[in-house]
Amino acid sequence: MEHEFDSGIGLLGERAQAVGAELQTVTPLSGIPTTAEGYDAVVILGSAESVTALGATPWFIHEQALLKDADARHIPILGVCFGAQSLAVALGGKVARASEPEVGWKMIDSVDPSELAEGPWFQWHEDAIVPPPGSTVLATSDVCVEAYRIDIHLGVQFHPEVTAQQAVDWAASDPAGLAASGCTLPELVALTNDLETDARRRAADLWDAFTAPSCRRR
């Protein structure tokens, strides 16, 4: 599920295709299915929107129905940033304003770094997740929950998919967010380029962990 043209699956998609996955992109414009029947997994990506402001927006209602249906069908879901927030709401959690925005490359505190690397991971958000009941928190920061697992589903507040081009696009479209990163645009792009090789490896590891057979058990 891709909400905006500059928020594609990026590095996660590279890994998915490298291991033989067939990707199908849906968007609010193309129409969001309300059933996950026929899919092996569902990935919900980021958005500049806030879950707390969407209310009865038709596409968000459809997305929530898709998530609930995937859960009922035992189809694994990966939620990324907004996607992790949407997943939390669908399964009984909440989303609230974070104490401060997190923007740019940040380290996180992982409960088990062998399962989820501590980063650095790319961040661009102002909201925070209260995970659904029954969740296991996998990582935190001083600001919020950074990753959680519930049953076979995984939600991450950071952006494992981000490429250097995505970082440029987001920074150009959100000057206030860029200011919060503490970097100028050239500095942010240079840092992203420097980190992209390691970020690609971490994204691949995260994808492999999400799709591992052991993660399909309740």
Image (spheres, rainbow, N blue to C red):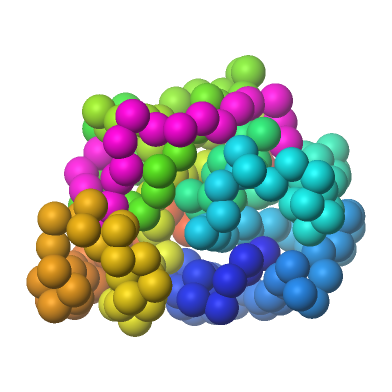
Magenta span dominant secondary structure: strand
Q: How many marks?
A: 0
Q: Residue at x 42, y 65 (%)?
A: 161
Please give the range of residues in magenta: 90-108
In the displayed structure, 146 sits above or below 131; it is below
Q: Residue at x 81, y 45 (%)?
A: 56
Q: Nearer the viewer, residue 183 or 152?
A: 183
In the displayed structure, 147 sits above or below 193; it is above
Q: Residue at x 84, y 38 (%)?
A: 72
Residue 126 seen in this snapshot:
yes
In the image, farthest residue toward the front: 176
In the displayed structure, 92 sits above or below 65; it is above
Where is residue 131 drawn, in percent x and y?
A: 55, 26
* Left or right for 168, reference 81: left
Image quarter in which the N terminus is found: bottom right
In the displayed structure, 48 sits above or below 15; it is above
Q: Residue at x 74, y 68 (%)?
A: 28
Q: Quadrant of residue 189?
A: bottom left
Residue 153 seen in this snapshot:
no
Where is residue 69 drawn, in percent x and y?
A: 85, 45
Where is residue 155 drawn, in percent x and y?
A: 53, 42
Where is residue 58 drawn, in percent x and y?
A: 83, 55
Image quarter in which the C terminus is found: top right
Q: Is residue 82 magenta?
A: no
